[in-house]
Amino acid sequence: MNARSVGLRQKLGSTVLVGLICLVACQRESHVQITTRTTLRGEQAATNQALELQVGQAMGIHVDAVKKRAIKPKWKVSATSSNTSVVSIGRADDKNVFVVAGVAEGTAEIEFSFRNRRVQIPVTVLPREDWEPTAEEFAFGGAGGWGGYGGSL
Amino acid sequence: MNVDMRLKRWVCIALGCLPLLPGCKGTTGSGTYGELGAGTFNYVCINPGDAVCSGNNAIDSFLVRRDLGRSGAIPDAIAVGSVFSLDYEGGSFENDIDRIVAAHRGDELGAEEFSIEQPAEASFLAVKNFDEVEDFVVVVAKEAVVLKIWVDEATPEHVQMQVGETLDVTVASMDEDEHLLGGALPYAWQSMNARVLGLTAPSNTHVVDALRNEGDVVLHAKELGASVVRVSSGDLGAELFVEVKP
């Protein structure tokens, strides 16, 4: 092996290494910034890393693409749910506002994509609270005057 | 968002709704703003048992305004298990496939017919082009714990009528805080003495001794005596003693 081929191999190796580092780094740099567009109700939480809501609830979110810690307001973001029977997401306007809805109890991921980049955000849909009816059975026969009119009814 | 909606939103901001943005939530003259402020949702009665659409003004007008709101606005709360519908105005929500769906499919009885089976805050989405959401609104469901029969804006236990006279009455469900609830429950009315007192639905002149699924009922004093009018829905019930005088 001569000096030239060693040099080439080293160059190739370092190029691949730089490429791999860049690939990993670029993927990690690309994420989304989520801001809520509707008042958070009980059981709802929204961060850049996760969303949480209750069955039957919905929340409006604005999603910005982020690259190298800079928001890219003009980048159009798309969104899909990994399991639409648990979480649905629909675009609300052209300015990256989406409505996330809790369809059924469970977990799913929403994938936001922009400029060939993809970011997965886990969504937890919590069950509605346990409930038992509390109303007591109405006792008929208490209407005023009922007893006094027994003979005429 | 069309020009009309933009105008409404700016008027809303100018009137001091700024802290409630972005939805600028509130009620318009004929509906309730969606959470995103893109349009308005209108409450629609789909059964005459819904106190929201009572036509005989028997329920206390203050409570109606406080709890059920203006025409078209979504009530503060609807009764668990009651049925109702919604429609939507705003933006580009006009083509044939646009519809309103519940976030939780279990809150849907059929096409744009809704019922919430337990106390909850349920969201309803105005969907267009299958996967775009124009806006959404929240409907609160509370348990109805009492029924009341309303007569002339009061809930008497006893009324007097004269033979041949008619009287408009309305049943309404209330929650544990005595707030009126929207939504139609399945009601069963009965006059316990059909010889003395008959019933009709407002849209019908045929006098009967029992009616189903009506909120407004007209009492007909037929002859001297007394009767009790009973209305029930599941475990809930209410009754009114009626004395018929000459």
Image (spheres, helix red, strand yellow):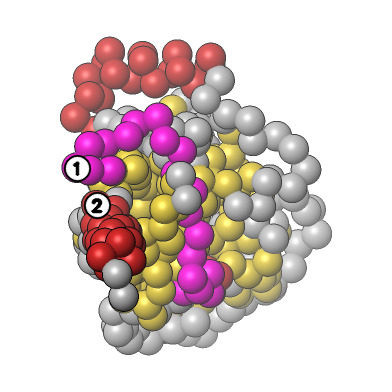
Q: Main secondary structure of the magenta part?
A: loop
Residue in view at x 64 percent, y 45 percent:
B128
Which residue extends farthest front? A2
Residue B138 or residue A139, whichever sits in front: B138
Location of residue A19 in the rendering, given as x and y in whole percent from the top left corner? 31, 58
Identified by mark 2, the residue type is: Glu
Residue in view at x 76 percent, y 62 percent:
B207
Disc 1 and disc 2 in contact, CB within 8 angstroms: yes
- Number of the label disc, if any, that sits on residue A29: 2
Measure the C-alpha gap from mark 1 to mark 2.
7 Å
Location of residue B175 in the rendering, given as x and y in whole percent from the top left corner? 31, 64
Quarter in which the C terminus of chain A is drawn: bottom right
Q: Tag 2: Cα neighbours inside 10 Å, few (<14), some, or many (≥20)?
A: some
Which residue extends farthest right? B206
Q: Chain of mark 2?
A: A
Helix, strand or loop at disc 2? helix
Whether residue A110 is visible, yes or no, is yes
Residue with the mark numbered 1: A69
Q: Is residue A78 magenta?
A: yes
Location of residue A60 in the rendering, given as x and y in whole percent from the top left corner? 37, 47
Q: Chain of mark 1?
A: A
Residue in view at x 43 percent, y 28 percent:
B28
Q: Which residues are magenta?
A: A67-86
